[in-house]
């Protein structure tokens, strides 16, 4: 049930029972798995309990790589049922990855399983868009990093198809799942800002881009901001999960990175962040977008955060490289235990081989160890033989990518950086955290690991009036979550040499 409110914060929802006023359910979907996490929030406590985890396994169909969104939704329902058994919840929030979407027909039915952003159908789509909106103008409006799978390019790739012609509504992944939970339609702005259809200056859908691309504005739902109510549970959802049908679904920062950045435990200015999981998202939190030609040339993105902030960052192919290596090694019956791999990597020779994590050959699923070795051979480097050498190559390469990205971000935005907050699953990787500190010459604060779920839950708690502004949210995280600190060590000149070698090889390859 909604109260009269201004758009967004402060209070937007009334919990169905005061007994549940401190418990919130975060539905958090990543590229390989989904979870439902219950968070309990108090003035000086913030506790998480994972009540259900389920796989997120894409399916390759004859027409391409698709998400099994029905299995994901069933996993969410099962997780909410477990949350109900654990004591009930005050509200529910949903976050997922960005850019992917489902199309609904005029009856509200889903037109096929959503495509996976790693599907190759977008390989040549950007050129079609640029004939109508050039790359400079597109960046000047959206401020968005060029990635071949951005939503605007996905739409161009499916132009003229039966599904596209029959579509009447486009819902990004979290908005689609919220629609199935509540029946409501909307588009949350932190995720909308990743599409290439969103105006970075006005925080609205771009009329210019829609007109140039002949896209019906009615295809895109009205925008919501974190803290807005998104509806209450449909009767059959409430019946299956055992939750009160009045349980509200609260709009959170539904792009998982936006939720993670909301949970960065920064208590002082001039910080940088790295949200490290399948991707490394490295950048700064700003008050306004940076839309200069230099920013476009450096391929930085301006995406929305909560409270009108801008996430000025660049995507780096993060732990995906290691995840794909582990999948390949598992097929060959080699060890995939992270502690063993990291111990071997720590003993491997430093800077024996380094790669550009964002090289195109690393984007698609496949035999990543072979691709890394081929990349090293092509660029005239020592080819890593052992698993430890491959992992060392990956982690040093990521640390160098973090260094380069944050230095560029600071220069383009005119900001100083005094420390780095590294959050997400990568914060558990001690070697990566230390290498990032060494490469950048800056202290690194690692944690929280569950930053996305924490950001999701705290936005819900804030909407319910239990916590204050963004600074209060971050202070609560800093005082309640386990954080680890890394100081720069080693030979700074060796990192300078490695960086010069890497980018020289990148230009010549």
Image (spheres, rainbow, N blue to C red):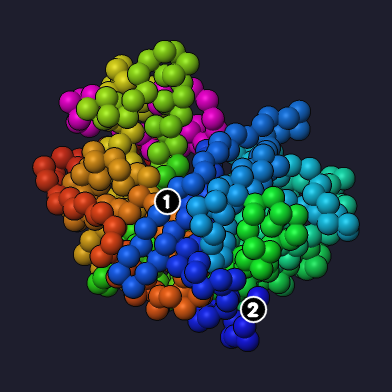
Mark 1 neighbour class, 10 Å CA radius: few under 14, some 14 to 19, many 20 or more: few
Using the rendered image of the protein, determine whether residue 483 is visible from the camera's viewpoint: yes
- Image label count: 2
Rendered position, 74 above or below 351: below
Residue at mark 1: 49
> In front here: 497 or 489?
489
Rendered position, 157 above or below 61: below
List x then y, in percent, for residue 16: 59, 71
Farthest-out residue, top: 333
> In front here: 247 or 230?
247
List x then y, in percent, for residue 473: 37, 71
Q: Is residue 339 magenta?
A: no
Q: Quadrant of residue 152?
A: bottom right
Magenta span covers which residues? 344-372
At horizontal 29% and vertical 58% (from top left) the residue drawn is 481
Choose the circle earlier in sequence order: 1 or 2.
Answer: 2
Rendered position, 22 above or below 166: below
At horizontal 32% and vertical 29% (from top left) the residue drawn is 338
At horizontal 65% and vertical 52% (from top left) the residue drawn is 241
Left or right for 340, reference 7: left
Whole-angstrom CA distance, mark 1 to mark 2, is 27 Å
Labels 1 & 2 near each other (Cβ < 8 A): no
Which quadrant is the N terminus positioned in?
bottom right
List x then y, in percent, for residue 245: 68, 64
Numbered disc 2: secondary structure: loop
Residue at mark 2: 2
Which quadrant is the C terminus positioned in?
top left
Numbered disc 1: secondary structure: strand
At horizontal 69% and vertical 57% (from top left) the residue drawn is 238
Q: Quadrant of residue 43?
A: bottom left
> In front here: 264 or 46?
46
Using the rendered image of the protein, determine whether residue 252 is visible from the camera's viewpoint: no
């Amino acid at each position: 049930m909604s109260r009269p409110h201004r758009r967004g914060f402060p209070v937007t929802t009334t919990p169905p029972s005061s007994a549940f006023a401190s418990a919130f359910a975060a539905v958090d979907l990543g590229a390989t798995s989904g979870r439902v996490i219950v968070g309990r929030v108090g003035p000086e406590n913030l506790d998480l309990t994972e009540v259900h985890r389920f796989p997120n396994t894409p399916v390759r169909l004859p027409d391409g790589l698709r998400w099994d969104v029905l299995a994901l939704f069933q996993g969410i329902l099962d997780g909410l049922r477990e949350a109900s058994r654990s004591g009930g919840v005050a509200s529910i929030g949903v976050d997922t990855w960005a850019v992917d979407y489902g199309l609904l027909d005029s009856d509200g039915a889903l037109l096929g399983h959503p495509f996976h952003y790693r599907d190759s159908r977008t390989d040549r789509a950007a050129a079609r868009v640029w004939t109508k909106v050039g790359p400079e103008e597109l960046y000047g409006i959206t401020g968005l990093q060029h990635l071949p799978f951005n939503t605007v390019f996905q739409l161009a790739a499916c132009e003229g198809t039966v599904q596209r012609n029959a579509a009447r509504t486009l819902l990004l992944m979290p908005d689609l799942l919220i629609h199935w939970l509540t029946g409501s339609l909307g588009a949350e702005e932190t995720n909308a800002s990743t599409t290439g259809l969103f105006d970075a200056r006005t925080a609205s859908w771009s009329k210019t881009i829609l007109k140039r691309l002949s896209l019906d504005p009615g295809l895109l739902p009205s925008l919501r901001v974190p803290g807005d109510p998104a509806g209450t549970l449909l009767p059959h959802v409430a019946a299956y999960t055992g939750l009160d049908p009045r349980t509200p679904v609260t709009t959170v920062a539904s792009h998982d990175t936006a939720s993670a950045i909301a949970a960065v435990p920064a208590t002082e200015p001039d910080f940088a962040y790295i949200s490290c999981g399948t991707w490394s998202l490295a950048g700064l939190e700003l008050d306004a977008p940076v839309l200069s030609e230099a920013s476009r040339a450096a391929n930085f993105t301006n995406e929305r955060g909560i409270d009108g902030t801008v996430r000025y960052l660049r995507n780096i192919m993060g732990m995906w490289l290691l995840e794909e290596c582990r999948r390949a090694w598992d097929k060959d019956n080699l060890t995939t235990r992270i502690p063993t791999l990291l111990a071997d990597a720590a003993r491997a020779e430093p800077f024996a081989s380094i790669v550009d994590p964002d090289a195109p050959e690393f984007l698609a699923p496949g035999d990543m160890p072979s691709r890394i070795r081929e990349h090293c051979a092509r660029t005239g480097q020592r080819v890593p033989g052992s698993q430890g050498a491959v992992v060392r190559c990956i982690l040093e390469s990521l640390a160098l990518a973090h260094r380069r990205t944050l230095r560029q971000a600071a220069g383009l935005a005119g900001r100083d950086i005094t420390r780095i907050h590294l959050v997400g699953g990568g914060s558990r990787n001690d070697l990566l955290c230390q290498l990032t500190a060494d490469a950048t010459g800056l202290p690194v604060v690692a944690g929280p690991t569950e930053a996305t779920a924490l950001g999701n839950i705290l936005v819900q708690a804030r909407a319910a009036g239990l916590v204050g502004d963004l600074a209060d949210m971050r202070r609560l995280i800093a005082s309640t979550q386990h954080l680890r600190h890394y100081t720069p060590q080693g030979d700074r000149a060796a990192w300078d040499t490695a960086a010069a070698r890497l980018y020289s090889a990148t230009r010549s390859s």
